[in-house]
C-alpha cells in the first residue's frame, strides 16, 4: 500500500473511479483491434494524467513521488497501454528537465498541460540495447541542423505533439558525438511509420518515426552538442523505477482477479480458494506484488531526496518486470482453462506484462547496470 496525504487520497479516488468506469472494460475491445483509444486517453489527459510529473514551477500539480506512483499503478491496473501512453508523455519531459533551457521546458510542459503527448525517440533498427549505435545524423547548416534517419518502436510516435530526438552531430566521437533535440509535431520532414501490431499493451501507440531532411533551428538542441547520450541515460535511470510501478499495477490486477475467481470456482465440492495449494500461490503472488511496489517506490523516493538511485531503479524495473510475467502466469494457472481464454482478463495481463522485461532497457541491460554498480571496474 501507499501512505498518501489527503490530496493524494482524493486524487487516487478520482483516478480509480475513472479507471473502473471508463477504462478497464472499454480497453478490452481496443486490445483486440489494436487501435489507440483516443477518447479514453484524451479524457485521461483532461484529468492531467499525461502531465503528472510536470513540476509545479512549470504549471504542473507538483505531486510527491508517492502520489505519482499510486496514480500510475491505478492506470496500469486498468490498462497497461494507458499507463504506457501517459508515462511516455512524461518520459519525454525528462531530458528537458535534465539538460534543457527554461523556454524548452516551459514549451513541452505547456503542450502536456494543454492535453498533448510527448515521445522519446532514442531506439533505432540497429540501436536498441546498444543505444550508442545511433545512425540518425544532424548536420549543421548555417543556424539550423538538418536531421535524417529513422527511429523504431517509439511510444506515442504517431500521436505526439513534441519529440525528443537523438542524432549524431559528430559520428567520429562515438557517444560523445550524440546530441538531443526538441522537435515539434508538424515540422516538415517529420513523419510517423505504421503502427506496430504488438503482442501486448495494444492500446498504446508504437511507430517508427522518420526524419527526411528535417530542418530544425539550432535552438532545438537540448544542452550542449555531444551531451545527448548522457542525458538519455540519465533520463532512463530515473524512469526505470516508474516502470516497476507499471508492472506492479499488472501484478495487483492479477492478484485481484485470481482471488475473486478462487472464491467462486467450485471443484470437488468447494471453492478452489479453500485448497492450500491455491492459497499459497496467491500468497506468493501477493509477496511479489508488494515487494515490487515497495522497491519501485523506494527508488522513486531516493530520487525525490536527491540520493543515488541508479542501481535501485534498475533493481525495481528488473524485479518487477520479471515478477509481473510470473504472477500473470500464476493468475492464468488459477483460472485454469478459463485463464487461457480471451473471455477472461488474465491472458491480456500476461501479454501486457511481457513488455516490462523489454522496454526502457531490457532486463539483461538492467542486470548489467546492477552488476557494474556492485563490481565497479576491476
Ligand atoms: C512496445 C515498445 C515500446 C517502446 N518504446 C520506446 C520508446 O518510446 N522510445 C525508445 O527510444 N525506445 C522504445 N522501445 C525500444 C526498446 O527500448 C528496445 O526494444 C529495447 O531497448 C531493446 O532493444 P532491441 O529491441 O533492439 O533488442 P536488442 O538490443 O537487439 O537485444 C536483443 C536481445 O539481446 C539482449 N542483449 C543485447 N545486448 C546484450 C548484452 N550486452 N548482454 C546481454 N544481453 C544483451 C537483449 O537483452 C535482448 O534480449 C520500445 C520497445 C517496445 C517493444
Image (spheres, rainbow, N blue to C red):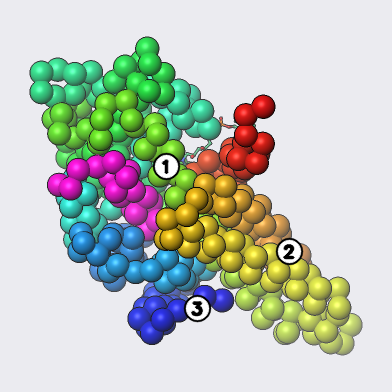
Which numbered disc, 2 or 1, marks the residue closer to the eye? 1
- Seen at 59% across and 61% down, the residue is 295
Figure label count: 3
Q: Please tell me in which quadrant of the rendered image residue 20 appears.
A: bottom left
| 10 Å crowding of disc 1: few (<14), some (14-19), many (20+) | some
- Ligand 1 closer than 8 Å to label 3 CB: no
What's drawn in magenta, residue-wise?
84-103
The residue beneath circle 3 is 3
Q: CA distance from mark 2 to mark 1?
A: 35 Å
Closest to the observer: 227 or 219?
227
Residue 263 place in picture, x, y as percent: 73, 84
Image vertical order of residue 51 relative to residue 3, above or below? above
Overall secondary structure of the magenta section: helix
| 10 Å crowding of disc 3: few (<14), some (14-19), many (20+) | few
Task: Give the structural element (helix, strand or loop) at label 1.
Answer: helix
Closest to the observer: 128 or 337?
128
- Seen at 75% across and 73% down, the residue is 283
Tag 2 and tag 1, C-beta contact below 8 Å: no
Q: CA distance from mark 3 to mark 2?
A: 28 Å
Residue 8 place in picture, x, y as percent: 39, 78
Q: Is residue 116 left or right of residue 272?
A: left
Res. 164 mark: none
Task: Give the structural element (helix, strand or loop) at label 2.
Answer: helix
Q: Is residue 297 shown in magenta?
A: no
The residue beneath circle 2 is 330
Amino acid at each position: 500500500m501507499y501512505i498518501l496525504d489527503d490530496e493524494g487520497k482524493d486524487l487516487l479516488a478520482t483516478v480509480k473511479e475513472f479507471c473502473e468506469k471508463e477504462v478497464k472494460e472499454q480497453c478490452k475491445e481496443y486490445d483486440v483491434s489494436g487501435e489507440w483509444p483516443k477518447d479514453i486517453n484524451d479524457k485521461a489527459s483532461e484529468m492531467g494524467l499525461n502531465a503528472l510529473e510536470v513540476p509545479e514551477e512549470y504549471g504542473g500539480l507538483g505531486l510527491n513521488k508517492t502520489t505519482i506512483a499510486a496514480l500510475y499503478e491505478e492506470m496500469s491496473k486498468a490498462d497497461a497501454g494507458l499507463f504506457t501512453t501517459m508515462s511516455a508523455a512524461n518520459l519525454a519531459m525528462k531530458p528537458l528537465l535534465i539538460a534543457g533551457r527554461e523556454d524548452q521546458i516551459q514549451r513541452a510542459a505547456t503542450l502536456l498541460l494543454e492535453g498533448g503527448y510527448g515521445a522519446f525517440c532514442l531506439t533505432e533498427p540497429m540501436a536498441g540495447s546498444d543505444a550508442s549505435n545511433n545512425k540518425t545524423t544532424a548536420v549543421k547548416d548555417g543556424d539550423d541542423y538538418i536531421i535524417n534517419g529513422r527511429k523504431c518502436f517509439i511510444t506515442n510516435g504517431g500521436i505526439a505533439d513534441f519529440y525528443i530526438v537523438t542524432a549524431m552531430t559528430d559520428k567520429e566521437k562515438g557517444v560523445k558525438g550524440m546530441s538531443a533535440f526538441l522537435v515539434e509535431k508538424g515540422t516538415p520532414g517529420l513523419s510517423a511509420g505504421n503502427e506496430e501490431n504488438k503482442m501486448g499493451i495494444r492500446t498504446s501507440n508504437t511507430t517508427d518515426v522518420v526524419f527526411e531532411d528535417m530542418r530544425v533551428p539550432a535552438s532545438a538542441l537540448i544542452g550542449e552538442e555531444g551531451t545527448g547520450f548522457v542525458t538519455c541515460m540519465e533520463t532512463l535511470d530515473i524512469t526505470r523505477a516508474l516502470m516497476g510501478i507499471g508492472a506492479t499495477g499488472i501484478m495487483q490486477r492479477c492478484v485481484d482477479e485470481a482471488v475473486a475467481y478462487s472464491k467462486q470456482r467450485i471443484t470437488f465440492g468447494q471453492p478452489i480458494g479453500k485448497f492450500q495449494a491455491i492459497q499459497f500461490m496467491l500468497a506468493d503472488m501477493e509477496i511479489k506484488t508488494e515487494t515490487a511496489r515497495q522497491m519501485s517506490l523506494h527508488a522513486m523516493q531516493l530520487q525525490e531526496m536527491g540520493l543515488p538511485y541508479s542501481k535501485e531503479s534498475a533493481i525495481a524495473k528488473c524485479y518487477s518486470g520479471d515478477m509481473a510475467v510470473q504472477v500473470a502466469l500464476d493468475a492464468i494457472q488459477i483460472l485454469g482453462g478459463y485463464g487461457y481464454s480471451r473471455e477472461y482478463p488474465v491472458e491480456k495481463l500476461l501479454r501486457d506484462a511481457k513488455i516490462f522485461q523489454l522496454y526502457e532497457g531490457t532486463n539483461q541491460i538492467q542486470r548489467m547496470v546492477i552488476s557494474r554498480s556492485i563490481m565497479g571496474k576491476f
